[in-house]
Image (spheres, grey):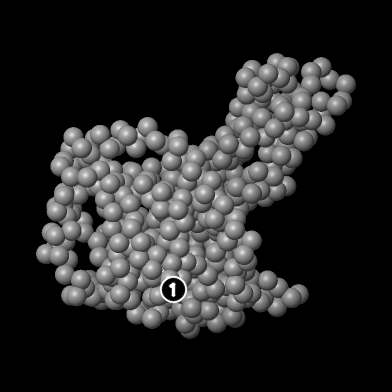
Amino acid sequence: MFFLSGEEVSPAQESEAEREELTDLSRQRSYDLASSATTITAPAEPGSESRVGAFPRQASNEWRESLLRRMLASGDILAVVFGALWIGFFAGENVSAFFWVVALVPVWVILAKLLGLYDRDQRALRHLTIDESAPLAVWAVLGSAAAILFFHLPVPGSLSSTGAGHLTLAVFGSAFVLRGLTRYLWRKITPPERTVIVGSGPETEAFLRKIELFPETHLEIVANVPEMDIDELRRGDGWLQSIDRIVVASAATDGRDVARLIAIGQEQNIRLSVIPLTRSLFGTAVQLSRIADLPVLEYRTWAVARSTLFLKRSLDLIVSLISLLVLLPLFVLIALAIKFDSRGPVIYSQRRAGAGGRPFLMFKFRTMVRDAEEQLKDLVPFDKLAEPMFKLTNDPRITRFGRFLRHWSLDELPQLVNVLIGKMSLVGPRPEQVELVERYEPEHLFRVSVKPGLTGPMQVYGRGQLVFEERLAVEREYIENLSLGRDLRILVLTVAVALGRKGAL
């Protein structure tokens, strides 16, 4: 069972318990309950109220989620007000349109509620604003349509179709930004969910690793136990009122145990998450469907549609061409800075493995000294690598300005030329050096089954922090579920990751 700070534990028991706990934790990260600033505290008596951070027991989840819903609604109201300001004072509409659109704020909030925009966060451990971009766009369109219908009533003022278009774009854009900022602020002002992990082994380690890579899950691991006795849990010893979530990753937990945990969670207002113990079964799963009450996993066993590939290539051409034209002044400034900073060419080219393993020359802004390739042979002997990948922290070959370029991912911009000529795509697995691809095992070759990308799943799911196995996993999931919508999502997330500079080398 768990260790309760309100119970008396002998030194010998405490030492043994700590050793058992540390054995079950991830190899990447340890959680020491004895030294934790927030421990699970049992109430003094059954009817008393204990505190979890600043929240009453059994109410922290409701309070936390209710606060987020109110904050999101406030952000949506500000977005509508901004849209009204835009059409009323900058888009050429009648100034009275501003006041009447603001008067329709309750309608916008009701529409958002009906579309589920205030209830999505509690349904997933990691919910990002980009995940709700489609319903958010629908909300902006419906709200603008409601405004047009309203102006057909006998009210002073009018709203043209052009004004409605401006309103839709202004509300969607501002709501997208404000919702992202709202979630960030909410995570700063609310304590994380106090979470207990049940289970041990690779699934538990993988979950702990994801919590480490993605702090926006907003979880605090307060205990990890190998197995859980459901009957003992059902009786409760006080600690049950001090946790917010249970994550199950135990082979000994069957369907009946999960059903009982669901009942306990509903009674105690504790969230429940279950990690599938056969992760490989979900590798190519597209979605979970149902035939009545029977859950069915639908797998992608068909080839990617040619229309999808055509749209992907069209997106590559349009975005790369426009980006090269718009960024041309920036390219000139970067080239001048590189020349002033160190001796050598501005553009660095290297043989990388493309689709089908065929080599091509990949372009980058030079961020290293002129003889970097010769130095690499001494720094990283490829024939002695345990895995066909490497990363050098504090690489001595990087120049002063090169370090700045890498931190902001600006050194990758010349690859837009590779995208334009069709050797790369905007999104895909990152192109690897030919010498490393030659050392791939057969199970690794899926990485070169599609065009490499300027950005990709590795860049938004951990970047340089990922080990080789994790990198393969996120890239396989991308390739097996390739779609234009997923590419757009990764492109948006890439901007956020680049600005945050997390995981950059």
Q: Is residue 275 above or below residue 370?
A: below
Residue 280 image position (x, y, % from top left): 49, 78
Q: Quadrant of the N terminus?
A: bottom left
Could you say which quadrant of the image residue 474 lies in?
bottom left
Residue 476 image position (x, y, % from top left): 46, 70
Q: Residue at x 18, y 58 (%)?
A: 373
Residue 87 image position (x, y, % from top left): 67, 23
Report whether 389 appears left or right of 426: left
Report whether 432 appears left or right of 372: right
Amino acid type of the residue that numbered disc 1 sits on in the rendered structure: Phe
Q: Residue at x 35, y 66 (%)?
A: 359
Q: Is residue 385 above or below residue 409?
A: below
Could you say which quadrant of the image residue 146 lies in?
top right
Of residues 329 and 196, the one nearer the viewer is 329
Of residues 412 and 287, the one nearer the viewer is 412
The answer to whether residue 8 shows anywhere in this view is no
Q: Residue at x 73, y 17 (%)?
A: 94
Count of all numbered marks drawn on residues in the image: 1
The answer to whether residue 286 shows anywhere in this view is yes
Q: Residue at x 51, y 45 (%)?
A: 319
Q: Is residue 52 above or below residue 292?
A: above
Q: Which residue is mark 1?
A: 446
Residue 3 image position (x, y, % from top left): 35, 68
